[in-house]
Image (spheres, rainbow, N blue to C red):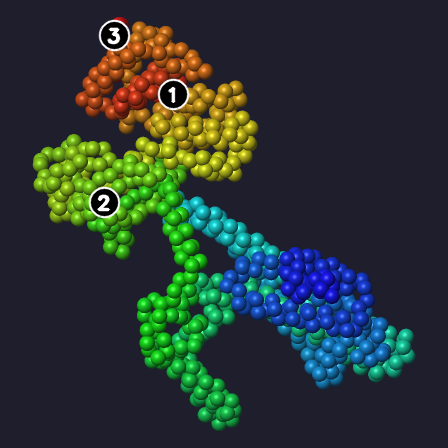
C-alpha cells in the first residue's frame, strides 16, 4: 500500500509541474483553437469553451483597468489576435452545431446559447435581432472604430516623436543629468512604446474584422438555418424561423458580448496615459474624479435642485444628489484632517506606509511601536552599503561643509550646471564623453576645502572662499587691489580673494574675476584634460566604436578585422596623452585599419594617425593671427640625433648618454625661457618624424612643457614662422 501511495502524485506535484510548463499551455491553447475549427464539439464542451471566452474577456478588461502603464502588458496585441481567433473558431463550432442539431431544439445545441436566446431576449426573436444589432453597432461603430483611430494616431505620433525623445536622452546624458544605464533604460522604453502602439494599430484591425465577421456569420446562420429547417427537416416556416433565429441571436450575443468587452479593454489601453502618482487606471480615475470636495458638493446641490423641479423624478434625483453632497462633505472633512480613515491603506500616498516614521500612531492615539527590520532586510542593507564602499567612481568631487551650498541650486549654487557645461566642452574638444562626476560632502576635509579624485585617488585640491570672488592679474592690471593673497588652483597664478563689493573695481583695474564655482569647475576641467587618457576606459572605447558603427559600419568592420578593442583603446590613449582630440574619428579609424594590417605596434600606429591628423594638429597650435610659431634644431644637431637613433621592435629610440641628455635639456630650456619672456606660448619644436616620439618622451620625463611635432604633422597650407634653432654642443 505504501508503494502505491508513493507512486500517486499529490496535488502539489501536479500544480508544480503545470506552473513549470506555463509556456506549453499557450502552445496547447493555440493548437486547441485550430482543432476547434476542424473537429465537431459536443454540446457540453462547447458550453465550457464559451464560458472560457467570457471569463477571459472579463480578465483582460480587469487587467486593463489595474495595470499601471499600457506598455507593462506588452503581449496585449498578440493576446487580442489569439482571443479573436479563439472566438471566431467557436463561432464556426456553434454554427456547425446550430445548422446540424438546431432542428432537435435549442437544448441540443448549447445551454449557454439557448439561455442567452431565451432569457436575455425573452424568447422573442424580433427583440433578439434588435438587441443584437444594437450591440454590433455599439461595438463596431463606436468602440472598435474609435479605438482603431486612436491606435493609428498614437502609433504615428509615437514614431514621429522618437527622434526628439532620443535627442533629449542624449542631451541629458551629455549634460550629466542621467548616466549611461538610465539612458539605455529610457531608449528601451521609447522603443517599447513604439513597438506597442504600432502593434496595437495592427491588432485593432483584427477587432474590426471580427465585428464584420460576426455580422456575416449571423446572417449566414439565420438564412442557412431557415433553409435547412424548411427544406431538409420539413419544418414549417414559422417554427424554422423561430428556432434558428433564436439560436443564431443567442450565439451572436454570446459572441458579441465578449467581443464588446475585449474592444472596451482595447479602448481603455490605448486611450489612457500613465501617471506615476497612481498605481493603476482605476485608482487614478477615483483620485481625479473624487479629488475636489467643492465640485462634488456643487454636483450634489444641482441634482437636489433638479429633484425639486415639478415633473422630474424627485426620489431618484434627490437620492443621487444627497449621495454627492455626503461624499463632498466627507472629502472636505478629510482634507481638513477632521476625518481619519484608519482602515483605508489605499488613501495613503503611493509608496508610503500607512504607519511610517516616528509620527505613526495607532487608532487610539498612542504611538505605534517601530517595525523591526527582518534579518533579510538588514542583510540587504549591509550588502548595499558594502557595494557602495567597494564601487570605484571614475571622477569624484568632495566638498567641505561650507562649500555644499555651491552645489545646491535651492541656495543659488550653480556648480552642477558648471560641471555639466564642462562635460559638454570636453566632449566638444576631445571627442569623447567624460564620465559623470559624483559630488558628495566630506567631513574629513576643511570646511572650505574641495578635493578632486580619480578612481579614488586625489589628483587635485584647493581652498575656496565661498562668499568671495577670485581676482587674477590678466597682465593688464593697473593698480593693486585689496584682498587675501592666494594661488589660483588650476594654473598656479597669483590671485586675490576679494569681497563681492570690490568685483566691479577689480574688473575696471584689469583683473579677471571669477566666482568660486567657476574656480572649481576650471580646476577640474584642466585635470580632466591632463588625465584624459585614464578616463577613456575600454568600456567607453567600445561605446565610441558602436556610435561610429551606426553611421560608418564598413569603416568599423574593416578595423575590427585587424585590431581589437584593446589596441584601439591604447592608440586613443596615446593620442589623448599628448592632447590630440579624437573628433575626427573616421580618419583615425581608417588610418588604424590601414596600418594595423602590417603592424600591431601602438607607437607606429599612433605616429601614422598623427600624420593624418595634420590639419587638426596644426589648427590646435596656430596663433590668433593664423601663424604657427616653431623652434627647430640646427642641421648638425638634428643629424647627430638621427645617427643616435636606432630601431628596436619596429620603434625608433634615441640612444643618448646622460651628458647628451643634459645638454639637450639645457639647450631646450634656455631657448624656451627666451621665447616665454617674449610672450610666446606654447613652445613648439618641429623635428624629423623619426625623432618626434623619443624627444617628446625625454621632455616629458624632465617636466618640460614642450610641444614636439614632426614635419608630417604640419599642414602643407599652414603659415609658420621659425623663431630660432636649438644647437647641441658636441661632447
User: For the residues marked 2 and 1, what is the alpha-carbon distance in whole angstroms?
Assistant: 46 Å
- Across and down, in percent, residue 350 comes to 42, 66
**Quadrant hosting residue 85:** bottom right
Q: Earlier in the sequence, mark 2 or mark 1?
A: 2
For the point 51% across and 30% down, which residue is it?
A: 564
- Across and down, in percent, residue 524 comes to 29, 39
Callout in the foreground (2, 1)? 2
Label 3: which secondary element: loop
**Quadrant hosting residue 655:** top left
Of residues 549 and 58, the one nearer the viewer is: 58
Q: Residue 445 carries which label?
A: 2
Give the left or right position of residue 146, taking residue 99 as reference: left
Label 2: which secondary element: loop
**Quadrant hosting residue 134:** bottom right
- Across and down, in percent, residue 657 comes to 30, 11
User: For the residues marked 3 and 1, what is the alpha-carbon distance in whole angstroms?
Assistant: 28 Å
Task: Let me know if residue 240 appears in the view.
Answer: yes
Q: Earlier in the sequence, mark 3 or mark 1?
A: 1
For the point 71% across and 64% down, which residue is it?
A: 2
Circle 2 residues within 10 Å: few <14, some 14–19, many ≥20: some
Q: Name the residue under label 1.
A: 713
Is 39 rendered above or below residue 393?
below
Label 1: which secondary element: helix
Amino acid at each position: 500500500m505504501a508503494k502505491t501511495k508513493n507512486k500517486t502524485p499529490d496535488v502539489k506535484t501536479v500544480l508544480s509541474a503545470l506552473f513549470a510548463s506555463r509556456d506549453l499551455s499557450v502552445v496547447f491553447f493555440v493548437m486547441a483553437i485550430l482543432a476547434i475549427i476542424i473537429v465537431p464539439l459536443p454540446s457540453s464542451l462547447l458550453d465550457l469553451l464559451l464560458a472560457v471566452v467570457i471569463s477571459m474577456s472579463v480578465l483582460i478588461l480587469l487587467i486593463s483597468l489595474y495595470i499601471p502603464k499600457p506598455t507593462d502588458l506588452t503581449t496585449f496585441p498578440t493576446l487580442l489576435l489569439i482571443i479573436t481567433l479563439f472566438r471566431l473558431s467557436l463561432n464556426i463550432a456553434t454554427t456547425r452545431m446550430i445548422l446540424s442539431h438546431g432542428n432537435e431544439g435549442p437544448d441540443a445545441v448549447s445551454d449557454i446559447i439557448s439561455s442567452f436566446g431565451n432569457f436575455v431576449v425573452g424568447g422573442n426573436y424580433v427583440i433578439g435581432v434588435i438587441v443584437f444589432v444594437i450591440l454590433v453597432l455599439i461595438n463596431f461603430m463606436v468602440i472598435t472604430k474609435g479605438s482603431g483611430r486612436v491606435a493609428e494616431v498614437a502609433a504615428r505620433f509615437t514614431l514621429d516623436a522618437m527622434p526628439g525623445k532620443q535627442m533629449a536622452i542624449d542631451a541629458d546624458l551629455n549634460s550629466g543629468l542621467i548616466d549611461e544605464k538610465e539612458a539605455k533604460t529610457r531608449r528601451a522604453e521609447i522603443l517599447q512604446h513604439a513597438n506597442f502602439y504600432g502593434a496595437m494599430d495592427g491588432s485593432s484591425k483584427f477587432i474590426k474584422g471580427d465585428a464584420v465577421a460576426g455580422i456575416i456569420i449571423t446572417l449566414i446562420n439565420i438564412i442557412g438555418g431557415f433553409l435547412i429547417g424548411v427544406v431538409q427537416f420539413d419544418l414549417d416556416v414559422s417554427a424554422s424561423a423561430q428556432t434558428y433565429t433564436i439560436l443564431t441571436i443567442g450565439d451572436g450575443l454570446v459572441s458579441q458580448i465578449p467581443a464588446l468587452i475585449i474592444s472596451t479593454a482595447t479602448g481603455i489601453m490605448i486611450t489612457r496615459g500613465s501617471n506615476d502618482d497612481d498605481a493603476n487606471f482605476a485608482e487614478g480615475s477615483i483620485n481625479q474624479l473624487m479629488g475636489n470636495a467643492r465640485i462634488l458638493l456643487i454636483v450634489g446641490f444641482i441634482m437636489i435642485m433638479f429633484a425639486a423641479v415639478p415633473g422630474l423624478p424627485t426620489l431618484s434625483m434627490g437620492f443621487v444628489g444627497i449621495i454627492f453632497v455626503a461624499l463632498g462633505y466627507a472629502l472636505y472633512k478629510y482634507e481638513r484632517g477632521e476625518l481619519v480613515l484608519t482602515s483605508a491603506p489605499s488613501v495613503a500616498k503611493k509608496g508610503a506606509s500607512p504607519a511610517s516614521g516616528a509620527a505613526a500612531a495607532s487608532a487610539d492615539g498612542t504611538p505605534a511601536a517601530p517595525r523591526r527590520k527582518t534579518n533579510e532586510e538588514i542583510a540587504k542593507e549591509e550588502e548595499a552599503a558594502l557595494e557602495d564602499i567597494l564601487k570605484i567612481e571614475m571622477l569624484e568631487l568632495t566638498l567641505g561643509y561650507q562649500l555644499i551650498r555651491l552645489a545646491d541650486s535651492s541656495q543659488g549654487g550653480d556648480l552642477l550646471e558648471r560641471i555639466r557645461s564642462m562635460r559638454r566642452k570636453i566632449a566638444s574638444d576631445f571627442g569623447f564623453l567624460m564620465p559623470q562626476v559624483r559630488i558628495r560632502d566630506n567631513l574629513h576635509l576643511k570646511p572650505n576645502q574641495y578635493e578632486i579624485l580619480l578612481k579614488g585617488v586625489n589628483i587635485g585640491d584647493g581652498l575656496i572662499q565661498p562668499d568671495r570672488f577670485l581676482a587674477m592679474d590678466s597682465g593688464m592690471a593697473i593698480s593693486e587691489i585689496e584682498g587675501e593673497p592666494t594661488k589660483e588652483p588650476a594654473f598656479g597664478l597669483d590671485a586675490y580673494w576679494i569681497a563681492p563689493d570690490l568685483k566691479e573695481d577689480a574688473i575696471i583695474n584689469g583683473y579677471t574675476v571669477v566666482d568660486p564655482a567657476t574656480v572649481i569647475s576650471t580646476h577640474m576641467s584642466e585635470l580632466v584634460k591632463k588625465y584624459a587618457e585614464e578616463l577613456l576606459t575600454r568600456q567607453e572605447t567600445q561605446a565610441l566604436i558602436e556610435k561610429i558603427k551606426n553611421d560608418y559600419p564598413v569603416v568599423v568592420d574593416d578595423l575590427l578585422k585587424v585590431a581589437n578593442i584593446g589596441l584601439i583603446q591604447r592608440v586613443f590613449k596615446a593620442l589623448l596623452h599628448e592632447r590630440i582630440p579624437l573628433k575626427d574619428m573616421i580618419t583615425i579609424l581608417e588610418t588604424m585599419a590601414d596600418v594595423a594590417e602590417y603592424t600591431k605596434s601602438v607607437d607606429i600606429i599612433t605616429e601614422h594617425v598623427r600624420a593624418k591628423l595634420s590639419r587638426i594638429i596644426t589648427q590646435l597650435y596656430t596663433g590668433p593671427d593664423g601663424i604657427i610659431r616653431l623652434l627647430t634644431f640646427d642641421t648638425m644637431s638634428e643629424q647627430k640625433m638621427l645617427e643616435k637613433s636606432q630601431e628596436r621592435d619596429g620603434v625608433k629610440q634615441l640612444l643618448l648618454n646622460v651628458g647628451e641628455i643634459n645638454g639637450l635639456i639645457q639647450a631646450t630650456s634656455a631657448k624656451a625661457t627666451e621665447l616665454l619672456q617674449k610672450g610666446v606660448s606654447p613652445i613648439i619644436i618641429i623635428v624629423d618624424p623619426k625623432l618626434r616620439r623619443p624627444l617628446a618622451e625625454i621632455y616629458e620625463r624632465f617636466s618640460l612643457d614642450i610641444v614636439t611635432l614632426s614635419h608630417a604633422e604640419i599642414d602643407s597650407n599652414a603659415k609658420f614662422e621659425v623663431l630660432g634653432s636649438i644647437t647641441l654642443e658636441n661632447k
